[in-house]
Image (spheres, rainbow, N blue to C red):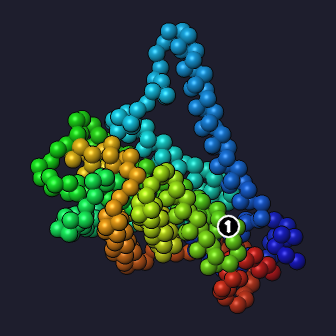
């Protein structure tokens, strides 16, 4: 009798034996059925519909307010300058941070364990997260300085500016003015406060959606372990890079590599913490440098980088990720979902491996 034909309520004497489930297949647990991924997808669609409904409701309220002589912010009049203001940056970061509750809701709808999207232990491992941010910043600062010095000495810098998002660290030394003196943007203190308080949430929101729920959702559809590792990593990296809009091949490749590296970190540490740490540290440094040299608007609207800049940025991502992975693995993080012991006599059998590792449970 196959698992799909087996009733949910097993006899008291039966015990389900599952192969160890790594992060990408964390949702293929004892409760997994073919239709459960549809519940997670439905939850995401429902949240998208609610967001669209909220936007429509505001549009109606705006029209009514205008008729009543009340002034409300006009969404059609928002310029690029507004998005790089403290208010605009706050709205943008908090909007992207909604990926966290979205992933939690979708994971709960599918597996009834929302915490599995954070890690295989079902919770955030704060020491890994906070320590990882510190380690990443300690690495990215000198790597950014060294990369800028190398590009400047070789005369390979471009005039297009630099990026302030995952996979592309800002490079204020790309122009002839160098790193000193600082030329901070107007209102830099308010901008700095918004960045410090909300950029980690923005980075976490993107990781929770792409490397979190979306990776696990795809992994729950795949029985074969290596497919469940490779396919989500490739698909989510492509979607993550495409989500940044129009961009040159090197900028796209930079973000694509970042997405692939983040998936590797998630798999080899059993959770999102180190990927979030790398993403948050990258964006904190990038936004901070953009403010220090009054280049926030150019950084946010970047569409191209020079090939040399792309190679340097990719190299910095790879070096930082390698050290972060070494640092995290020394702390022996859990890599598989621990199953609660079932009541009744144990059922023994050969250890699952290979394709069967993600297959249906063996029942007594």
Query: For the image shown, how many numbered marks are present on the structure?
Result: 1
Q: Quadrant of the C terminus?
A: bottom right
Q: Measuring 14% from the left and 52% from the top, which residue is drawn there?
A: 177
Q: In which quarter of the image is the N terminus?
A: bottom right
Residue found at the very far left of the displayed protein: 181
In terms of depth relative to the viewer, which is nearer, 157 or 53? 157
Q: Measuring 23% from the left and 40% from the top, which residue is drawn there?
A: 185
> Badge 1, how many Cα within 10 Å: few under 14, some, many 20+?
many
Residue 186 is left or right of residue 112, and the answer is: left
Which residue position is annotated with label 1?
Answer: 220
**Residue 318: percent from the left, percent from the top?**
37, 72
- Residue 319 lies in quadrant: bottom left
Q: In this view, does 197 lie above or below 140?
A: above
**Residue 339: percent from the left, percent from the top?**
63, 72
Helix, strand or loop at mark 1? helix
**Residue 36: percent from the left, percent from the top?**
74, 59
Observer able to see residue 11: no
């Amino acid at each position: 009798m196959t698992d799909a034909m087996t009733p949910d309520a097993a006899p008291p004497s039966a015990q389900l034996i599952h192969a160890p489930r790594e992060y990408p297949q964390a949702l293929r647990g004892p409760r997994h059925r073919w239709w459960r991924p549809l519940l997670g997808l439905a939850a995401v669609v429902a949240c998208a519909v609610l967001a669209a409904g909220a936007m429509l409701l505001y549009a109606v309220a705006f029209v009514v307010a205008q008729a009543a002589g009340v002034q409300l912010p006009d969404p059609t009049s928002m310029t690029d300058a507004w998005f790089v203001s403290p208010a605009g940056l706050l709205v943008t970061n908090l909007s992207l941070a909604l990926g966290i509750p979205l992933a939690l809701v979708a994971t709960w709808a599918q597996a009834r364990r929302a915490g599995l999207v954070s890690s295989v232990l079902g919770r955030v491992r704060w020491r890994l997260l906070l320590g990882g941010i510190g380690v990443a910043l300690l690495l990215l600062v000198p790597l950014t300085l060294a990369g800028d010095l190398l590009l400047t000495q070789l005369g390979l810098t471009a005039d297009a500016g630099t990026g302030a998002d995952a996979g592309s660290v800002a490079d204020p030394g790309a122009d002839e003015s160098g790193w000193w003196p600082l030329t901070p943007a107007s209102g830099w203190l308010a901008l700095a406060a918004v960045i410090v308080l909300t950029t980690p949430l923005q980075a976490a929101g993107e990781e929770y959606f792409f490397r979190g729920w979306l990776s696990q959702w795809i992994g729950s559809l795949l029985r074969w372990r290596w497919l469940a590792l490779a396919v989500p990593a490739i698909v989510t990296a492509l979607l993550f890079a495409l989500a940044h809009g129009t961009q040159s091949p090197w900028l796209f490749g930079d973000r694509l590599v970042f997405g692939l590296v983040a998936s590797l970190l998630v798999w080899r540490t059993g959770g999102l913490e180190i990927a979030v740490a790398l993403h948050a540290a990258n964006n904190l440094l990038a936004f901070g440098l953009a403010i220090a040299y009054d280049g926030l608007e150019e950084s946010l609207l970047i569409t191209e980088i020079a090939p040399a800049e792309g190679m340097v940025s990719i190299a910095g991502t790879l070096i930082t990720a390698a050290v972060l992975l070494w640092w995290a693995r020394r702390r022996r993080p859990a890599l598989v979902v621990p199953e609660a012991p079932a009541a009744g006599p144990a059922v023994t059998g050969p250890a699952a491996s290979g394709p069967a590792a993600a297959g249906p449970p063996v029942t007594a």
